[in-house]
Image: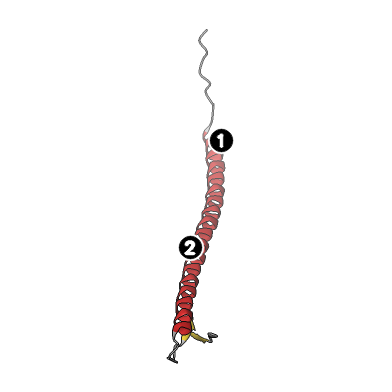
Amino acid sequence: MDQAPIVLALDVNAAKQVALALVAVLAIGALVAAAIIRSIVTKLIMVAVLAVAALVVWSQRSALQECSDRVRSAADGTDVTCTFFGAEVDVPE
């Protein structure tokens, strides 16, 4: 019970049409893939930028806390200036 293999009978014009359709499908697939990849890369860049910004703000916050502690411990009237991103901040004693 051997079955004969199925052979597609294509002429040259039909093969050209199939090739043209495949090129169109692949081009559309490439555009969709590019949009998805761009979206993913954009999200990753935004996450990285926000994470760096959070680290910078946290670092400034820590420095401000240390400066505030120095102001409160400076009982001899020593002038201590605290800054947050370069702006002077008043620290109540």
Label 1: element kind: helix
User: What count of labels does the image hold?
Assistant: 2
Identity of the residue drawn at 56% across and 46% down: 24
Tag shown at residue 57 = none
Identity of the residue drawn at 55% across and 55% down: 35
Which residue is label 1 attached to?
14
Q: Is residue 10 above or below residue 83?
A: above
- In the image, residue 7 lies at what x, y percent? 52, 23
Q: Is residue 39 above or below residue 26?
A: below
Give how far apart the Cα atoms at labels 1 and 2 are. 51 Å
How dense is the environment of label 1, judged by Cα within 10 Å: few (below 14), some, or many (20 and up)?
few
Q: Nearer the viewer, mark 1 or mark 2?
A: 2
Pick the front one: 68 or 21:
68
Q: Earlier in the sequence, mark 1 or mark 2?
A: 1
Instruction: Identify residue type, mark 2.
Output: Ala
Label 2: element kind: helix
The reply to whether dot 1 and dot 2 touch (C-beta < 8 Å) is no
Q: Is residue 48 above or below residue 1?
A: below
Residue 86 seen from this side: no
- In the image, residue 52 lies at what x, y percent? 47, 67
Furthest toward the front, the residue is 75
Pick the front one: 15 or 45:
45
Horizontal arrangement in the rendering, residue 13 relative to residue 75 (left or right): right
Pick the front one: 38 or 66:
66
- In the image, residue 46 lies at what x, y percent? 52, 63
Which residue is label 2 attached to?
48
Instruction: Identify residue type, mark 1.
Output: Ala
Identity of the residue drawn at 44% across and 86% down: 74
